[in-house]
Amino acid sequence: MDRNQVIGILLIFFILIGYGIFTKPSKEEIEKARRYNDSLAIIAAQESADTVTKKITDSVPDTATASTVQLPDSVKEKNFAEAFGIFAESAKGNKEIFSIENDLMKVNVTSLGGRIFSVELKKYKDFKGEPLVLFDGDSTVFGIDFFANNRPVSTNNLYFQPVPNERTGVTSTGNTGLKMRLSASPEKYIEYHYTLEPGSYMVDYSINLHGMSDVIASNTNYLNLTWEYQVKNLEKGRTFEKDNSTVYYKFYEDEVDNLSERSEKAEESLRTRIKWIAYKQQFFSSALIAGNYFLNAEVKSSQQPENSPHLKSYSAQISIPWDVRKTESIPMKFYFGPNHYKTLKQYDLDLEQLVPLGWGIFGWINRFIVIPTFNFLGTFISNFGIIILILTILLKLVLFPLTYKSYMSTAKMRVLKPEVDEINKKYPKEKAIERQQAVMAMYKKAGVNPLGGCLPVALQMPILIAMFRFFPASIELRQQSFLWADDLSSYDSVLSLPFTIPYYGNHVSLFCLLMTISTIFYTRISQNQMADTSAQMPGMKWMMYFFPVMMLFWFNSYASGLSYYYLLANLMSFAQMAIIKRYVDDDEIMRRIHENKKKPVTKSKFQARLENMAKQRGYKVPKKK
């Protein structure tokens, strides 16, 4: 073997090693594949008992009916032992319901899976006036999955038993706590411990594993927790509620994120540590919070058909850290309650971000101005229609200086309209640049800023957008009536249509209609106050009316409280404009403009720097005539 052959073999050897290194799956990919394979095995185990029974049943002659097929007890015991191993005895039982409750909610726990079966919030009703139950029924899934004695086990399908109180001997199903135990043997068991304190929407929950290090596979470093349920339709506007419901999650010591709200199906693989996962609806949420952190998770959300009593289906596959010891307790918490900013804020877990108040400056306005003012007014005023009225008055008073400045800028432009017309006559359309320069020079000499009317309006936009996010997310308005509106958090239907108009709906919301009409009138008055631009941009006049008309379609199914607020804002703007016009004289404005024209035009610092730079380069700045 010569030197070239040796070099060639070595190169092939190193290439193979490099290929193996670069194509080796990451730790996250290995864990994901392992979790997927474990889930498949667990699903197979759940069906194994039924499969064995079906095979035996199929062997019975066709003349025997299903009701006459009786398997021997020994066969049944063998089937259970084969399918469930050490947990075979826990695979048999009767489903019972146990309750814990406080002044705010009632939590029902089922013996099948030891899981929370339903949650009722006592201070709230659904849109039908019935008790508000966040979720209930056998569609809920909550359990840990693992391997024991070479068999996959899912606690969701096994029967737990309530633990008697050690002091009294009675089952611990009082108002404060409940223990549900899944036994492999007297000294080896899994226990769910639920504790509910008075005046709290938080349920303390822990998974206690006793002696399970001898049962669970020794190479297991995590437990797979499955949590899923179907979201019920709780609000009047089904479509609007659905568009404001999704899965939220907080990364450990990091930010909060969520799945898409309007997608028919959405899912996300969370590969890093997670602090909590929340199943959010428009005004209520169910959240599972780690005592420390979850390793990773797979979260999904899918929409239900329109004729279904449910809006969406949520599911999460969560990896919980597991340390093999004789006894271990894994602490967690459940939050079942309203998306109320102040309530969620007190837990210091960033749960308040379940209330979508907007990002950046819009969220700041809501958190630090609107919500405190709203809560303050709510302490001594019970009618939320009156509260919105007072809130609108306060905001309009705060914004009045900007409104006044905008009106004055528009008035100056209006009185200068004849001079602008003279300039337009002097310069033909072909000399558009010279015409624009002449108009701007005249404005500058008169001391008028053509953008002066736009800037105050732009400064008011953050408040308008902040209110757009506040009203639909404010649970305080939920089921609060005012005038003809029976729920300020939903649409106010005064007429049901026998047909559906695309993008509009099958009803007429009166607040939305009045808001649209007032906006059109406001647009008309604003145009009359401004200099006529129709000659230069004839299409712009009609474009100004396009947005108010579109609002009729956008807001027809929106929160009526928001339409009511915009209506009040328009009416108060009319009043402010009437007051300003009463005390502002166009002749006085023209007199001040003539005084400004007599003053020498001062150069801005920026213009002076430009001219200075030009002189240094030898360029002579032309003198003004």
Image (spheres, rainbow, N blue to C red):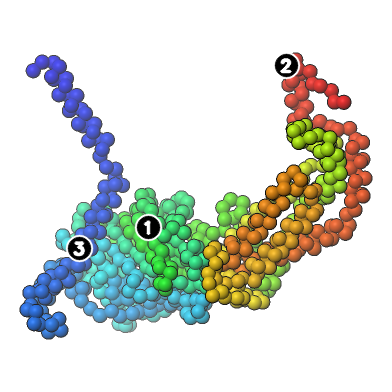
- Look at the image and tell me whether residue 376 can be seen: no
Residue with the mark numbered 3: 44
Q: Are marks 2 and 1 in contact (CB under 8 Å)?
A: no
At 25% across and 35% down in the image, what residue appears?
Answer: 21
Marks 2 and 3 in Cβ contact (< 8 Å) = no
User: How far is disc 1 from disc 3 in space, using C-alphas?
Assistant: 22 Å
Q: Which amino acid does label 1 sit on?
A: Val
Q: Position of residue 305 (x, y in %)?
A: 40, 68
Callout 2: SS: loop
* Residue tagged 2: 617
Q: Report x, y in % for residue 153.
A: 22, 64
Q: Is mark 1 on a helix, strand or loop?
A: strand
Residue 251 shows in the view = yes
- Dividing the picture into quadrants, the one containing residue 467 is bottom right
Front label number (2 vs 1): 2
Q: Distance between the residues labelled 2 and 1?
A: 65 Å
Q: Is residue 228 left or right of residue 411?
A: left
Q: How crowded is mark 1: few (under 14 residues within 10 Å), some or many (20 or more)?
A: many
CA–CA distance in space, label 2 to label 3: 84 Å
Mark 2 packing: few (<14 Cα in 10 Å), some, or many (20+)? few
Is residue 408 depicted above or below 485 in this figure? Answer: above
Q: Name the residue under label 1.
A: 299
